[in-house]
Each structure stands twice: as C-alpha cells, then as structure tokens.
C-alpha cells in the first residue's frame, strides 16, 4: 500500500517539496519505491521440508521501509529480553520543546546525538546522587521522532531496570517503591545540560520554555515497553494496515489517540503525506538505539554477575538466525541460499 502511494505521488512530492528534501530523504524514497520490485536482485530460497524452491525479490533493507527489517527488529528485541532482570522496570521520556524542532530538522545528527547523550547523562547523574541508592543504572535508549499522528516530535524513551550497581561497595541495590525519579527535577537538569551542549556545539539556541516535559513511570517487568520500542525501531513509522484509503489525491490513515485511546483518522494530500513520512528519516549511520551502564554490550560480564546475584536462570546463548520465509505448499521454513543479481537494463 505505502509503496504504491510513493510511486503515485513521488512526482508531486518533488514538485512541491523537492527543495526541502535532504540527500538522506531522497535515498530513503528511492529505496522504498524500488523495494522487492522485479528490477532488484532476487534471493533464491528453498524449503527445508518439501524441497520447493523459488525466487524472492530482495528487500531494500532501509530502516524507514515498512516492508523490511522485521528480522532485525526481532533480533534487537531478543537481545534486550535476554538482558531482562527480575525487577520492576521504569520508562523515562525526554521531549524536545517545539521551539527546537526547526533546529533539529536543520542539524538532525548533532541535535539527536545531544538529545540522547543529555537524557542518558541526566539519568546517570540522578542514579549516582539519589540518597540511599548512589548506584550506576542500566539504560536502554531509543530515539523517536514522531507522534501517533506522524507529526515531527523528537523525543527519547529510556527503559530502566529498577536497580543499580554501587561500585564502591560492589553490591546490587534495588529501587524500592513505585517511582524512580521526579519528572520535573529530571526535566530541569536535562534542559540545562542539553542547552549547554547545544551552545558548545556552536548552534544558536532559540528561546525555550523554562519548564520542559519529562515523564518517568513504572512499566511492569519491561517486556511490554521493550516490545513497544521495537515496533518502530527498523520498520518505518506506519504500517500498511493503518493506511485505510487513497482516492488518487488524498491519503487517509488511522492512529490511536494517546490520551483517549480511541482510533482516529487523518487525511492529507498524497504528496504531503509522503513528506510527513520522510521527515522521520534519520541521518545515514545514525544509531537510534543505544545501551548504557550494565546493559552496554561491553558490560556482559557485569550483567552475568547481576543475573547470578538475582538468581536468574542462565539465558540460552543467542544465535544469529537467518531471515526465514514460509513455504506456500507445506508452510515449512524456507532459507535463502543465494542471490541472483538483477540484469542491467539495456541502454
């Protein structure tokens, strides 16, 4: 559905918004338009049960494409669930005020890096300074740039296990109670640190509100929060099932209102709809998801010790599974065993 919309409205998009698109956004548009088309390379896949084989057009692999990266999404979620601890989990959300959105659009790589770093640094500081806790936290950080209406709204979600390491005493300390840290206090420190970092980066800082929005809430055992973050990590910001109508000039999509929890619709001109999606394309090479503290990839030994202290059953070793396809004859698993290169079009 989305791919046909990209094909139908791309020329109108370029006519109306072409001068506002970045190189990365053009690259994403081209990749998503060509994804799994006959002109692309093909995968040779074979069923492991009935020996049926076929060719499958290769996906573009772009993280903004809603047809791709399902395998990468599952791998990321598996890694995070592999690190789970038997404690309460919390999720903190740090949001940029509207006055800084144009700055983020103009300098996305710098602003997004500072947003992630400042949010993580703020939580680390609170963890080390909290009375009777004074411990290093583990953080799973994911950047989002959109609301459910798909508006441009950069913010960071951070999932935090309810416990930390007191390095001086070499002990695990559990967070007690229903709350992690006060949201207003987090916002105050985050605002000061982010604006200072922005100035040091040589970026002109606009006038912003004195009070920024930061939320911190309990999210159970963490599985639901991590699954939610994984949903938009590698597969774009909208699925085909949420695009409900295209009349040739306008596109209508549905979304669930975050406050009322009711389904609503939004209708936009086709080219405006695509431009809205492309606003959420990240700079090439930018890492949207990052881990800190004892959840970092370099802290595997520390995490194993924590899991031993908390009597967590040793999780099975993660295997790098290949992407799988389902056989249309027997529903068996099909594996890709080769690539058939597309023939160059005749000149």
Image (spheres, grey):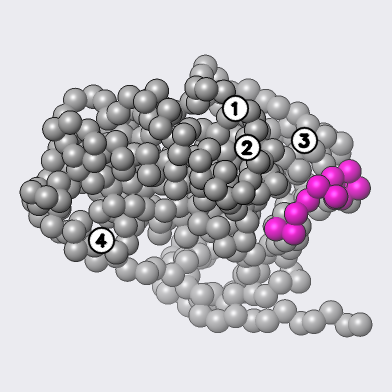
Disc 2 from disc 3: Cα separation: 36 Å
Q: Earlier in the sequence, mark 2 or mark 4?
A: 2
- Circle 1 sits in a helix, a strand or a loop, which is it? loop
**Which residue is identified by label 2?**
205
**Which residue is identified by label 1?**
208
Residue 195 visible to an observer of this rendering: yes
Disc 2 from disc 1: Cα separation: 8 Å
Q: Earlier in the sequence, mark 1 or mark 4?
A: 1
Disc 1 from disc 4: Cα separation: 37 Å
Q: Residue at x 71, y 27 (%)?
A: 266
Q: Residues within 10 Å of mark 2 (few under 14, many from 20)?
A: few
- Circle 2 sits in a helix, a strand or a loop, which is it? loop
146 to 318, vertically: above or below: above
- Per the rendered image, the range of residues in magenta is 12-24
- Circle 4 sits in a helix, a strand or a loop, which is it? helix
Location of residue 50 in the rendering, given as x and y in whole percent from the top left corner? 45, 74
Location of residue 166 in the rendering, given as x and y in whole percent from the top left corner? 14, 46
Circles 2, 1 touching at the beta carbon (< 8 Å): yes
**Which residue is identified by label 3?**
251
**Which residue is identified by label 4?**
299
Location of residue 199 in the rendering, given as x and y in whole percent from the top left corner? 57, 43
Disc 2 from disc 4: Cα separation: 36 Å
330 to 161, vertically: above or below: below
Residue 275, image quadrant: top right
Q: Earlier in the sequence, mark 1 or mark 3?
A: 1
Pick the residue in front: 334 or 186. Answer: 186
Q: Residues within 10 Å of mark 1 (few under 14, many from 20)?
A: some
Q: Residue at x 55, y 34 (%)?
A: 96
């Amino acid at each position: 559905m989305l791919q046909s919309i990209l094909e139908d409205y791309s020329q109108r998009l370029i006519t109306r918004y072409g001068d506002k698109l970045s190189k990365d956004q053009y690259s994403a548009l081209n990749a998503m338009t060509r994804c799994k088309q006959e002109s692309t390379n093909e995968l040779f896949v074979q069923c492991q049960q009935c020996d049926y084989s076929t060719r499958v057009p290769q996906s573009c692999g772009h993280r903004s494409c809603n047809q791709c990266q399902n395998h990468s999404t599952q791998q990321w979620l598996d890694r995070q669930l592999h690190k789970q601890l038997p404690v309460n989990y919390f999720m903190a959300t740090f949001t940029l005020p509207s006055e800084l959105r144009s700055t983020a659009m103009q300098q996305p790589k710098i602003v997004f890096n500072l947003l992630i770093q400042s949010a993580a640094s703020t939580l680390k500081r609170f963890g080390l300074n909290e009375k009777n806790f004074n411990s290093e936290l583990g953080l799973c950080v994911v950047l989002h740039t959109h609301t459910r209406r798909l508006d441009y709204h950069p913010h960071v979600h951070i999932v935090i296990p309810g416990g930390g390491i007191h390095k001086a005493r070499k002990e695990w300390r559990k967070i007690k109670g229903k709350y992690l840290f006060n949201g207003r206090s987090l916002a105050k420190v985050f605002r000061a640190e982010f604006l200072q970092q922005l100035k040091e980066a040589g970026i002109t800082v606009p006038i912003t509100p004195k009070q920024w929005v930061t939320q911190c809430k309990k999210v159970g055992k963490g599985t639901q929060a991590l699954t939610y973050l994984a949903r938009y990590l590698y597969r774009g910001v909208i699925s085909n099932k949420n695009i409900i109508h295209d009349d040739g000039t306008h596109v209508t999509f549905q979304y669930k209102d975050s406050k009322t929890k009711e389904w609503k619709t939004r209708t936009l001109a086709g080219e405006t709809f695509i431009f809205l999606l492309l606003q959420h394309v990240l700079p090439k090479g930018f890492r949207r998801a990052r881990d800190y503290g004892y959840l970092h990839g370099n802290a595997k030994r520390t995490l194993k010790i924590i899991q031993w202290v908390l009597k967590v059953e040793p999780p099975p070793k993660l295997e790098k599974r290949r992407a799988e396809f389902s056989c249309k004859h027997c529903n068996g698993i099909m594996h890709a065993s080769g690539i058939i290169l597309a023939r160059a079009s005749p000149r």
